[in-house]
Amino acid sequence: MKVFKWFPPKKNSLGNRIFVLTMTITLSMVALLGFTFSYLSTNIIKDHLQTVLVAIVDSNAIEIENLLDNALKNALRITNDPKIQAVLRNPRPVSIAEAYSLELEMDNQLSFVQNYVDHLFGFYIIGANGMQFKSNFSSPIYQDWKDFDWYQRIIASDSPVWFDPHEGSFTVNTIGQPLVTMGLRIMDKSTGNILGALLTDIEVSTLSSIVRKGMGETGHFILTSSDKSIISQSANETNNSEYSFSYTKDISLAGWELTGYLHPSLIENSVLSMITPILILIAIIAIIVLFASSSISYRITAQLRELASLMEVVQSGNFRVTMDTSGDDEVALLGSTFNVMVSQINNLLRDLHDEHEKLRIAEMKTLEAQINPHFLYNTLDSIIWLARKGKMDDVTRLVYSLSKLLRIGLNRGRTMVTIEEEIEHITNYLIIQEVRYADDFIYEIIIPDSILKNKTLKLILQPLVENAIIHGVQQSDTSEKITIVGEESGTDILIRVTNSGPQVPQDRLDEINLLLEEGSESDFGLGLRNVNERIKLYFGQQYGLHFSSNSEGTTVIVHIPRI
Amino acid sequence: MKKYITLALLVVILFSSCSPVKDDQSPRTSETAKVQVSDTRLIVGFSQMNHINPWRVAETNDMRQVAEEREINLLVADADSSIEKQTQDIRDFIAQGAQYIVCTPFTYDGYQEVVDICKEAGVPLIMLDREIAGTGGVDFLTFIGSDFYQEGVRAAKWLAEVMGNNAKIVELHGNEGSSCGIDRANGFHDGIRTIEGMEVVAFGYADFERIKGQDVMEDIILSFGKEFNAVYAHNDEMAIGAIQALKAANIRPNTDVTIISIDGSKDALKSIIAGELGATIECTPRLAKTVFDTIADHLLGKEIPPKIIIEDRLFDSSNAIELFDEGF
């Protein structure tokens, strides 16, 4: 494997996009899963906690109710006890000794009842006859209780009276712990007279220990009395508005209510403890996906990136690269196509280069042909000869034509000239040759005005005319005629150069035309071949020279585009 | 940096785990929070071993009452009969700035840690009503309370006088191993040793409780018959319970059987007035005056004796009505 790159390097690279795409899809799936799971588990936990809260409140309320019920039953048992009824029905013994003895005895009786009742702090009897009993060790407070509010309330009610928490007992010395008290009046079963009141003390701490059972810190329980004052609560805070769920159970015996509040944080904590492992799992999956998609995208795009870097090399001008295409996937196909493309471009460039080279050579040859030393010598010889003969007009014409000929030929190195300029050039050439060959030939140039301003390669007519003179004029004894005719042919221009010399045999003509068509090397006239080659290189293979011949003469047709 | 974060987390955890403990404290100690906010008054921590009998209830109420009169901030904690809780309560007092600690020890041994805590914090420790292993003035400031041994001796002396040096005695102990019980027994036994006709014929443990006193006495009557004519109970509650058992068995208290106990509660005085209990040796729970006087002396730099013994009275039919309100 290649060197692993942690992260695709370019932001917009294909690898990066694949990476981001796979990451996005996977993570959103995982996130969706996580959200669904946490949503469902939150609901389940919420329901569960609510059910648990309800169960705990019910259970605790029942326990409190049982405690109160037990207290009440025993209180009723005491109030209906025949001996107690008798002691309270009779007046208090006059003798203090007797009274105290009786009180201590009754104390003992109550102690025994209390001994079999759990969770009670004490029973006390306040007799209307002034006697006072207690079930526990507490030291009694001796006072006339009949005018006290709590006493009046108890004897006025035919049902148990529940007193809210108060510090210390009503009738005995305590250390001041909070107590709730149930008061029950004692009726004489035989006369219906009120014999006194029975007080039952229950320590609030006993109730609190029941109230606190269950839930823990985030659930909150409050025991309230019938007037909604708080008897006991599981926490000191009283702000219940921030609790998300509450459930109240009546403790009908005393008219109390036990309410449980569910704190949202309990749900949150439970949910958290449940989904934390899931979240960790999601995080692990995310990391695995991060690595995996990074690795996958890197591997998928490795060949593409190789291709891209090879393309950069090609772009910089180096066509000698090939890609290793050792796969059978799309990228390998792309690679082999790339290789083909590069090699084709390479070939094209080589061809182009070759053509340029050929053109350069052809132009050099054209220039060489134009300032052919042989031609120059002949011309200058003709001038000398004419000067000796004193034909000064002819000398002047010749020198003038020669100078113009050379000027156009030089023509500041331009390749293209107008047809008009080319015609002017060939005219000057013909003038010179006409003087040279005396009156061996005549010439005629017919060019329509419409094509005079069209462009052509320079010096394409001179070799043709030269050829016409060599093959037409020199090989004939009679006076010959050279005709140059230009015409439009659709989008092209045809210029015909005709000499009236002897007919060329047809097989020779076909051979020449084939050679011109193929542009191949041969011993065929260098000048003509050069012209043909230049036209084809400049304008395309469909253009060039074409020979035809009949008894009237031989014609070379120059075929160029009209530009 | 990491260290600080860890530290902060630790602190948070500690506090969060501490708070429910505070909530759990019984409502009895909630008042400690109240006095905490008040001014620069003297702060005294009072660690009461429990409140399961009227004597201790009276003792705590007396401490409160006198502290209020003298404008002293009294922190009170109920140790629920646990030395561990008592040790923790005393730690809490010191943390709350208590300048003196008053402690009623549950047992004779097991208070070295309390002694060390107070010594380390430089807070004087006063042992109240029961002694511990150690020396007053060295391990703790002083012991304030009654002389339990003398109580036993006085009970023996009274019984010998009333019974004419001739008694078959049932002895009711409290719980085994309590220092006051041991002293009350030893004092009594030493008191009767020299007297020929005085002997303990039966004994039982009744945990200083009335109902148990009755139970134990019932058992003794059942197994022993009426072969005794005196009862020595280590506290009033057991004596009162025993009297109910005697009455139920048709044994007339004060006539067939003479009963003496120790403490001097209201119920005991009632019983004396009712003609049932012969006498009770006072062992007053009202020690607060002496406690705060001692603290005042100590603050003034006076020398504090290693033991301060309270002068106790004896209640019998001659003074019970007159001194009824002196009972607790």
Image (cartoon, rainbow, N blue to C red):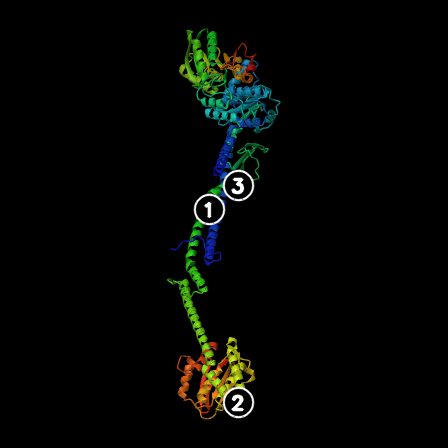
Mark closest to the chain's N terminus, 3 or 2: 3
- In this rendering, is residue B138 above or below A474? above
Task: Look at label 3 and name its amino acid.
Answer: Pro
x and y, in percent, of residue B304 in the image: 52, 15
Q: Distance between the residues labelled 3 and 1?
A: 20 Å
What is the spatial separation of the Cα atoms under label 3 and label 2, in whole angstroms?
130 Å
**Front tag of 3 and 2:** 2
The answer to which of A225 and A558 lies nearer the viewer is: A558
Chain of the residue on which disc 3 is drawn: A
**In the figure, is residue A507 to the left or right of B297?**
left
Q: Which residue lies under the disc numbered 1?
A: A279
Q: Of helix, strand and loop, which one carries label 3? A: helix
Q: Which of marks 1 and 2 is nearer the N terminus?
A: 1
Q: How crowded is mark 2: few (under 14 residues within 10 Å), some or many (20 or more)?
A: few
Q: In this view, does A439 lie above or below B307?
A: below
Seen as rendered, the residue at the extreme bottom is: A478
Q: In what element is the residue under mark 2?
A: loop
Number of disc labels: 3
Callouts 3 and 1 close, C-beta under 8 Å: no
Question: Do the residues marked 3 and 2 share a common chain?
Answer: yes
Q: Mark 1 lies on which chain?
A: A
Q: How far apart are the two marked residues, 1 and 2, measured between alpha carbons?
A: 116 Å
What residue sits 42% from the left and 79% below the top?
A519
